[in-house]
Image (spheres, helix red, strand yellow):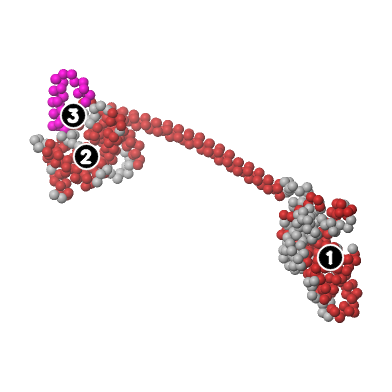
Amino acid sequence: MEYNIETLMREYGNDVLRTAYSYVKDKFTAEDIFQEVFIKAYKSLDSFRNESSVKTWLIRITINAAKDYLKSAYNQKVVPMMDFKEDMLTSEDDFEEIENRDRDEQIRNTVMNLPEQYREVLLCVYYHDMSVAETAKSLNIAEGTVKSRLSRARDLMKNKLEGRL
Amino acid sequence: MSEKDLLTDIESDEAFRSEIRDDFENEFNLQDLTVSEDLIARTMAAIRSTEKEETEEKTAEVKETTSENKIRNIRIVKWVSGIAAAVVIGVVGIVLFKSGLFSTSKSSDSATAPNYFSTSTTNSMGSDYAVKEKTESADDRYVTDSIDGGSLYTPPQTEANSSNGYNYDNQVTTAASESYTPSADECKNEAECSDSAEMVSGDQQMDNLFFSLKSHLSVGSEENITVAQALKTEIEKITDDLGIRDGFEEKAEEDTEDIKNMIRTTEGYEIIMDCGSYAEGELTALLGELEDPAELFVVNTLLSDLQDSQ
């Protein structure tokens, strides 16, 4: 089965972009990773043997690219946007605005604030509807590890979402 | 709770699943994380750019590889031609060396001329015919010196030589270039020894005769046949041909001269007499070795006639 890279971009582009964002938490960086993922996919299309679904394959490439980005020395030197903004605060009003926004985000982004190892299994299983086996393959971990992390993530989430459930 | 039950519990917890999904969706929508046409176009442009770069890199690699191959081929050609030149030089050197171009001998032929006296060092009677270069021993009658002697021997490759089973090539040694020079004792006068032209002729004749004697041997193809053995065999042949072995003593008492005359008619007699002093020493030695009276008579007749001829 032959794949057209542009078709793949349109079909699975959102999954790739959002997965990248769930790691780097920056839209522009996620878009850079998006490009990197599809360039790699284009180069490797001939070697793709349909052993897994195309989506799982692309998600796996995305996770690896995002983790590589996070590990890169370049990223260690980047000043987070929020830190920069806080440095630029000049008035009490600005400070209150930021605090309120953070509180809203805290409530809204319970999942996004989970530790990475739990967040990634939740993303794969609950957001991308991937099976435990596919998740294990994408994250390069054992299926048992996926299950235990899912259980732990659920406990953490339930504690955080107690008031909302 | 077992692992399976736990998974079933998690998967069946639809409210939890929905909550997680909504959380992700909300976050992604808030960040406007949707693939735009612009992003697709930029990505496609990046892919094409990468593709172009790769093509250029491949072209450059091909060129580089081609260039490297050319350099390697040139090196291989140089190596091969160098080796070939070395081989040719070696072969030419060997050929020239064998042809005697590098020989230190004054005579250009001396390096290739075989010496038929060099391999039989000691015969059964203890006579030493081995050629010894520049040996000063008085017992060595055939001491040679290629520089001083100057005479060379080239064996006549006659049919008889090749058919009698003797391998003369095996007798060629490093001393092959040596030629026969009579010792001081053999020189009857100073003029004889100093006259090199005459000596060359005499030596060659002597060698040819000796070679002829050896070529008449009928003892087979032994390689290291000695002069003494050759003579001994020849004497046995003469005795047998004449049929004087049985009751010889009685015959000798009556017909001594007749038997001597018969001996003088044989081919072997003629050959041995031609060898002259060359065979004399060996015949004398054979007297102490032979037991058959008929053979002893033949030897005595030969010796007597040889001495008379000198």
Main secondary structure along the magenta-highlighted residues: helix
Asked whether residue A50 is in view, the answer is yes
- The residue type indicated by label 1 comes to Glu
What residue sits 22% from the left and 24% below the top? A84
Same chain for mark 1 and mark 2? The answer is: no
Q: Mark 2–mark 3 contact, CB under 8 Å?
A: no
The residue that mark 1 highlights is B280
The answer to which of B278 and A93 lies nearer the viewer is: B278
The answer to which of A28 and A114 lies nearer the viewer is: A114
Category of crowding for the residue at label 2, using alpha-carbon neighbours closer than 10 angstroms: few (below 14), some (14–19), many (at least 20): few
Give the residues in magenta: A83-109
The residue that mark 2 highlights is A117
The residue that mark 3 highlights is B30
Q: CA distance from mark 2 to mark 3?
A: 23 Å
Q: CA distance from mark 3 to mark 1?
A: 132 Å
For residue A103, side relative to residue B245 (left or right):
left
What residue sits 73% from the left and 46% below the top? B101
Same chain for mark 3 and mark 1? The answer is: yes
Q: Give yes or no for residue A95 being in the magenta stretch.
A: yes
Q: CA distance from mark 1 to mark 2?
A: 117 Å
Write down the quadrant of residue B178 in the picture. bottom right
